[in-house]
Structures are given as C-alpha cells and as structure tokens.
Image (cartoon, rainbow, N blue to C red):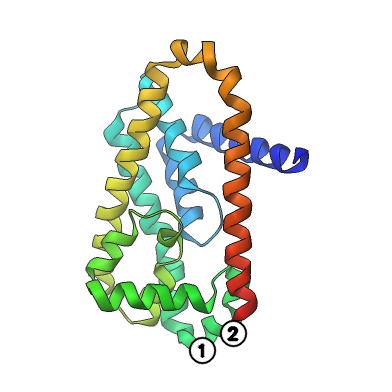
Amino acid sequence: MEVINSILASVIAWIQSTITAMGPWGIALLMAIESCNIPLPSEAILPFAGYLVSQGVFSIHTAAFFGAIGCVLGSLPSYLLGSIGGRPFIEKYGKYFLISKHDLDTADKWQKKWGDWAFFICRMLPVVRTFISLPAGILKANLPKFLAFTFLGSLIWSYFLVYVGVKLGENLEVLKHIWHKLDAVIILACVVLFVLYLRHHFKHLKES
C-alpha cells in the first residue's frame, strides 16, 4: 500500500509540475499521453487544471480546449497503428499497449451499435476512451470524422473535469478543515479501484 501511495503521489506531483510549468500546452501534452494508451488518467490531469482556473491562471475554455486538442493529437498515433497493423497485429502485440482482445471486441460492439457516433460517446466514458483509437484505425474509420468526434467528445469530458477542479478550488478553504479526514479514504478508494481495474484488465490480456 505504501509503495502504491508513493507512486500515485509521484505521478500527481509530476502532472501538477508539468501543467504549472507549461500551462495549457502542459494539459495538451498530458492528455495526449493518455490518448496514446498510456495509463495517465485524465481524472488526475484536468481537475488540477480546473484548480488553476479557479486561481485565475487561465480560463475554463482554454483548459478544456487544450485538453481536447491533446486527446486528438494522442489519438492519431494509435489510429495509424491500428490502420497500418490491422486487427491481427493488435491481437498479437496489443498486450504491449495494454490492449486485450476483449477491449477490441468491446469497441467493435460500440461501433456496430452506434456507428461513427461511438467515437464521440466513448470519449466521454472512463477507461474505454483511452483505447478506442486503435479499433477506429483497424476499422478504417473516416479520419476527419473520427478526429472531429474525438475532439467534440473530449471537449465535453474536459469541460466536466475542469469544472470539478474549479469547484474544488473555489471551496478549498472550506475543504481544508475536513480534508485530513477524507484524505485517507480518498487514497484508499483510488488504490482499490486502480487495483480492481488492473486485475480485470490483465485477466483479459491473459485470455487474449
């Protein structure tokens, strides 16, 4: 538990220092990393950006816009990898990108049910939003349309999480008085959810 807490603290500190140093482009960089199938959750990136919005560093529109731009930039390499390599390549080597056959099947179901709108919807859903680009490439989805839906869905997602950060920042003084009581509970909940996610995810990787 101590090791996981230390890792989480280090990741969060790095996210905060990156955005503080680079401003909106730091938001774009971090969101691009997440969209490249690297487990760097936007749930830890955008609320801190929202906190900076509450401090007057930049506007909520700037933070959300650069968050969406980062998602688009990070989605391109994954899309191209899926488009060039195809499903056989991803099924064989996807585990190195933390993508299982189950993930591909899930994305296929979404795409069959909703068509191109699946790319818009999935960008507003935790977890699935990080790996939808590979299946989009495999399916040879229309690239301009895919990028447009990626931007719009990510923009809504970004506005939501940035707004959460803004509200936290505006009520920071009130929260300070109870934060020490909530801190342990929040960390424990994050650790449990993260471990359950990894367990579920790697179970499907083994089955691939």
Return the mark for residue 88.
1
Q: Locate residue 191, reporting x and y percent.
A: 63, 44
Q: Position of residue 151 (x, y in %)?
A: 28, 55
Horizontally, is 136 left or right of 92 in the view? left
**What is the distance, in whole Å, between disc 1 and disc 2 at their CAs?**
6 Å
Task: Identify the residue at image location x=60%, y=18%.
Answer: 180
Name which residue type carries label 1.
Pro
Q: Are marks 1 and 2 in contact (CB under 8 Å)?
A: yes
Residue 157 in view, yes or no: yes
Say few, some or many: other residues with alpha carbon within 10 Å of mark 2 (under 14 / 14 to 19 / 20 or more). few
- The residue lying at 59 percent from left, 31 percent from top is 185
* Element type at mark 1: helix
User: The residue tagged with tag 2: helix, strand or loop?
Assistant: helix
Q: Quadrant of residue 35?
A: bottom left
Tell me if I can see residue 26 in this picture. no
Instruction: Say which residue appears at 45% left-offset and 49% top-offset.
Output: 31
Q: Would you name the residue on which mark 2 appears?
A: 92
Q: Which mark is residue 98?
A: none
Q: Nearer the viewer, residue 170 or 61?
A: 170
